[in-house]
Image: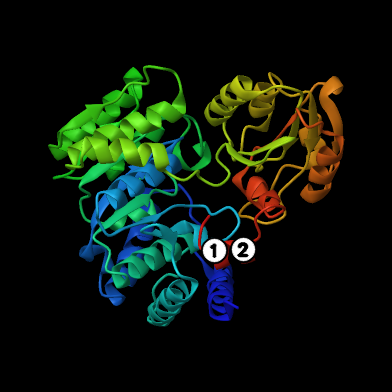
Amino acid sequence: MFERYHAANKKLLSLMNIEQVWKHTSKATLEASLKRVRQLLHRLGNPEQAMKFVHVTGTSGKGSVTYIMHEILRRSGEKVASYSSPHTTSYLERFRIDDKLAHPDALAAAIEVVIDAHEQHVLAGHEALTMFELNACTALLLFQRAGIDWCVLEVGMGGRYDATNVIPSPVVAIITNINLDHTDFLGPTKIHIAKEKAGIIKPGCLVVTGETAVGPLKVIRAEARKCKTPLLVIPNETGDHLEHNADICRAAGLLIGMSPLVIELAIENTPPLPCRLEVIQEHPRVILDGAHNVAKMQATIAHVKRMRKGKVHVIFGCKGTKDAASIAKELTQVADSVRATRFTEGHGAPVNPLQVLKLFPNKLQVRAYLFPHDALTDALKVAKKSDTILITGSLYLAGELRTHWRSEKQILKARKS
C-alpha cells in the first residue's frame, strides 16, 4: 500500500546529496536561493500565483498559529491548505488540505512533476535546489492542483530568504515572536533575527505580530512602514503562550473578514499539533514536545508545572547547533530523572548523549542511551501511573519516539496527523 508515495519520497530524498549548502555567507548567496526557487516554480507554471496566502513566521508558535489559521479558514467555508515543517513522523504531515492530510497519491504525483522539472533545471546548468526549497515547490504545486483558494504557509527558518518567501504579497503576514534560535544562520541578536523575520512583510499585506520587545518591534514597525502596510501588535496579556497564539489568530482572522463566532469555534476545535505539548498516552502521561531553544523550553516547563502530579521523567536529546546547556538548565526545574539520548534520523548531527547527560546534576542522571527507543522502554518501565514522561529537546527525537504510538503506516491510512 502507498508504494507510489514511498517511491516518490525516496527519490526526492535522494536529491539531498547534490543540493546547495544553505549558508548565511553573503546577500548574493541568500538571494541565489530565492532565484533557484523562482526558476523552478516558473518551470512548474507558477503555481504560487493561483492562491491567496497567510504567511507565518516567528521563533515559537508558528506551527500552532498555522494550524489555527487553517482551521479558521476551513470552518469559514474556504478551500484551504497549509504547509508546515519539519514533519515529525511522516513527510505527509507537512501538507494539510481542508480537514485531512494530503492524499499520498496526490502528493506522489506532485513530487514526480517537481523532480522532472528539477532535472530539467539542473541539466540546463542551474544550481540544484536544497531539500527545503524542493519541499516548498512541491507544496505549492500540490495545492494549486487541488484547487486551493487559501494557503497558510509556515516559514522554515527566518523569513526574508526562506524558500517560502517567493510568494506574492500575502493577505496577512504573521510574526509570532522573536527569540534566539538558528543564530548560526539568522544572526547573533534578536535585532538580527527580527530583520530576517520581518522580511515576509510585503506591500499590500496586513501585518500581525505578537512581539512587543522594544528592539525587535522597532524593526518590524520599520519594515511595515517601508512597505506601507498596517501593523497590529498583540501583547501576551496572560503569559500563556498557547492563549497568545490564539489571540494572534483571532486578530488575523478578523482582519481578513472571518466571523468572530467561526474564529472561536476554530480555536476551540483545532486538532493538536504533533509533538508540540502532545499528550500521546495517559497513566503514565507521556508528553511529546519538540522544544529546542530556551524560550520554547520555558513555555514547555510552565505547561508541565501546571499539569504535573507525580514525578517527571525526562528523555532529552538535541541537535549539535542548539544551546544544550541552557536548555538543560531550564529542564532541571521539573525533572526528577533524565535519560539522555539522540535522534537517529533528521537533518544535522545530535549532541553525543553522554555529553548531554553531563549537563544535568548527578542526582538527576539515569544514563545515556545511544538508541532513543531504549530510553523510552526504560522510562515506561520505571514510571508510575501518576508520573509524567516528557520527551523533548528536538522535534526529530519526539517524532522518532512518536512511532511507538503512531506509525507512518497508520498516519498514511488515516490521513490524520
**Residue 150 higher or lower than 307, as above or below:** below
- The N terminus lies in which quarter of the figure? bottom right
Across and down, in percent, residue 416 comes to 51, 58
In terms of depth relative to the viewer, which is nearer, 351 or 57?
57
Question: Is 383 on the left-hand or right-hand side of 193?
Answer: right
Is the residue under label 1 in contact with that under label 2 (CB below 8 Å)?
yes
* Residue at position x 45%, y 74% in the image: 111
Secondary element at tag 1: helix
Is residue 21 at least partly visible in the picture? yes
x, y (%) of residue 397? 67, 47
Q: Quadrant of residue 335?
A: top right
Q: Is 53 placed above or below 221 here?
A: below
Badge 2, how many Cα within 10 Å: few under 14, some, many 20+?
Answer: some
Residue found at x 44% / y 43%: 63
Q: Amino acid at mark 1?
A: Ala
Residue drawn at x 44%, y 65% as measured from the top left:
102
| Above or below 36: residue 188 | above
The circle on residue 414 is: 1
Q: Which mark is residue 40?
A: none
Q: How many marks?
A: 2
Q: Position of residue 204 (x, y in %)?
A: 13, 45
Query: x, y (%) of residue 134?
Result: 44, 66
Q: Nearer the viewer, residue 226 or 273?
A: 273
Tell me the tag on residue 410: 2
Residue at 45 percent of width and 79 percent of height: 112
Occupied quadrant, residue 191: top left
Is residue 160 shown to the viewer in this render? no
Q: Residues within 10 Å of mark 1 (few under 14, many from 20)?
A: few
Displayed quadrant of residue 383: top right
> Please, is residue 43 above or below residue 357 in the view?
below
Horizontally, is 94 left or right of 318 in the view? left
Q: Label 2 is placed on what type of residue?
A: Gln
